[in-house]
Image (cartoon, rainbow, N blue to C red):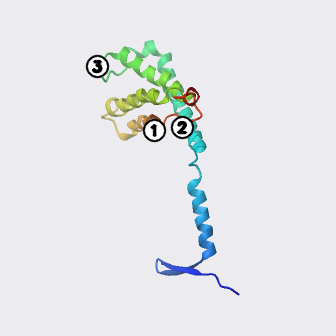
Amino acid sequence: MISQPRKSGCLFGKKFVFKTSNLSLMKKLISLASSIGTSNKNISVGLLILRAATGLFMLIAHGWPKLAGFSEKSGGFPDPIGLGSPVSLSLAVFAEVICALAVALGVFTRVAAIPLVITMVVAAFIIHGDDPFAKKELALLYAIPFLTLVFTGAGKFSLDAKLGK
């Protein structure tokens, strides 16, 4: 009988022995696990989910209510950059409706995500600047995926890809 070469080691003072065949199996499993999700298709599926969910959540939960209540909100909307409440509300509606829809569809994604990042950073650090972190958190949780999309683009399952952008 031929014995298989063994490798041994020590972990927390305990001796252990690995058969070479077990090591190659482990290497194959690690290689397989580390390659899952790194194909262009998987990355694009992930970007599709990120774009659609974040864009639609922004549109439905924040943009649409601002647009629907524009006349009531325009007088008392925060004016962090000194342009007046109606202009500030218009800029927020543009970002949270038009740009959010563009991001969700994957059209002009990198450009459309920029106003969303700016709006969320202003909301977090200017509008809620003196508030506890819990008040800033939602704006930052929206800003991060939009900032990610500025760098990554929409992926191949988008109108940007169909248009060759």
SS under mark 3: loop
x, y (%) of residue 116?
Answer: 43, 28
x, y (%) of residue 158?
Answer: 57, 31
The answer to whether any part of residue 76 appears in the image is no
Q: Residue furthest front?
A: 164
Q: Which mark is residue 92?
A: none
The amino acid type found where label 2 is placed reads: Leu
| Residue position for label 3 | 82
Is there CB contact under 8 Å for labels 3 and 1?
no
SS under mark 1: helix
| Residue position for label 1 | 148
x, y (%) of residue 98?
Answer: 49, 21
Dot 3 alpha-carbon crowd within 10 angstroms: few under 14, some 14 to 19, many 20 or more: few
The answer to whether any part of residue 72 appears in the image is yes
Image quadrant of residue 119? top left
Is there CB contact under 8 Å for labels 1 and 2?
yes
Quarter occupied by the N terminus: bottom right
Image quadrant of residue 140? top left
Q: Residue at x 59, y 52 (%)?
A: 36
Q: Which mark is residue 50?
A: 2
